[in-house]
Amino acid sequence: METNNQQQGKFGKWAKKSITARMLMVGILILVLMIPLTYIKSLIYERMLRQQEVVREINQKWGEEVLIYGPILKVPYKTYSEKTLRNTVTKVTRKETIENIKYAYFFPKKLNITSTINPEKKERGIYKTAVYKSNIHITGDFSKPDFSEIEIKDKDILWDKTRVIVQSSNLKGAASLFEIKFNNNKYQLTSKNFNNSTSSKLNHSKYLNLNELESNNLQLIDAPKEKEISFSMEINMKGSEQIRFIPIGKETDVNIKSNWKTANFIGEYLPHNSDKITAEGFNAKWRILDINRPFSQQYFKGIPNLKNYAFGVNFLIPVDEYQKSERSVKYGFLVIGLTFLVFFLIQTMSKISIHPFQYLMIGIALTMFYTLLISISEHSSYFKAYLIAGISVITLITAYSKSILKNNKFTLFIGISLTALYTFIFVIIQLENYALLVGSVGLFLILAAVMFASRKIDWENS
């Protein structure tokens, strides 16, 4: 028994005095503290999903993204095929000509779109999104359709059954009837297939559903049988997130005006005017020619899916607090490790005893920074949240270290080190393009400082 007690006493003294034992203890504590950091990452992801769910619910009730595809001219024509018929009684065969009705689709020669957007913010609890009302004025003209590609004679074209098609992603947000005007005649477009599928909730052009609207037959005077025919449309739509158009004109000119201050231009094409951003909002202009896009002006086998070539403006309110919080948690290992390293060096060089429980309390305080950051950033800006959480944690650990180290010089050093560390992490998070460069240089300087501070430690006799 006495031998065992002596061995345990020797082990306790070794664990208390040995640098190797203290290093093992600090390393184990760092690994243990990775567990709460993992839970904090899950919390951020959960809050992010909740924010997206609330925004999606608001958008669904108001009206979702607006995507306009059209107008498109739909012209029916006749084709003929032969069918062999055989009389089973007389055994005589004969050929019969079968008449088929098919449809050709033609895009406008010129397409001019002018849209005025009036966005506003909608809030639910701590979450908010941008919705808008839009006035869209569309003009242009159709040239005489060319059927030479499929060798259709003019007499087989059913001009009196010509119609106009417009596709839109958001009929729920329509604030006026869809009407198109040729000469002095107006034609109302009615819905042929109303898609309200949940796939539109995926918020991706690949899955976005389009609702098709079609007019009645145009009068012969309004069909481009002999010459170009001009048209005009006036559309009022409510929407959210973004508004986009597909450049189906041989020449497409689009002008979008708004008082929205944080415009984000999206899609395959960007505005060409350099003065698009103004103090009052933005006035963006696009000019797209048929040579700029990889699709034709006419189709004889249905309307093609051209949603991937849409362009426009995104009105989403930038909510990057969760993304920044998530990035800051990724540096949690670095913050805990460097903080423990500072205490370890002070303990080793000054021979001050720091208990593992005290290391654990410091580590828990460091992890509390991230929960404070997430909760405060939901009600304020990320900068204010980071500042409040940082000051709180630095003050707490500095005050706690005063009771441990019993030395004002070491306490001040702890406070300065933590302030520098959190400032360094904040700078890295803000500088997305230079994060790797600044982080690498900063870590190199930290390593140099640690090597300089530990150069006089007697590792063999400690």
Image: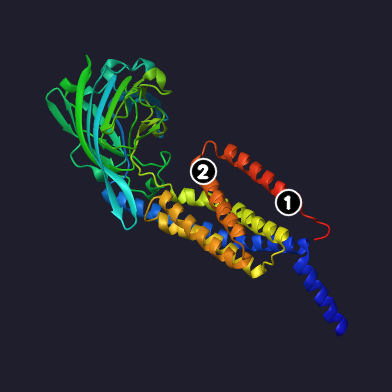
Q: In the image, what residue occupies the spot 30% across and 35% down?
A: 167
Q: Earlier in the sequence, mark 1 or mark 2?
A: 2
Q: Confirm whether residue 100 shows in the render.
A: no
Residue 148 x, y percent position in the rendering = 35, 15
- For disc 1, the marked residue is 454
Tag nearer the camera, 1 or 2? 1
C-alpha gap between disc 1 and disc 2: 27 Å
Residue 440 in which image quadrant: top right
- Pick the front one: 105 or 53: 53
Q: In the image, what residue occupies the spot 59% across and 60% down?
A: 408
- For disc 2, the marked residue is 427
- Pick the front one: 264 or 340: 340
Of the 4 image quadrants, the one containing the C terminus is: bottom right
Residue 159 in which image quadrant: top left
Which element is circle 1 on?
loop
Q: In the picture provided, is 417 more to the left or to the right than 231?
A: right
Q: Amino acid at mark 1?
A: Ser
Q: Amino acid at mark 2?
A: Val
Q: How is the image coloured?
A: rainbow
- Pick the front one: 28 or 190: 28
Cβ atoms at labels 1 and 2 below 8 Å apart: no
Assess disc 1: are there few (<14), some (14-19) or many (≥20) residues with their C-alpha within 10 Å of its C-alpha.
some
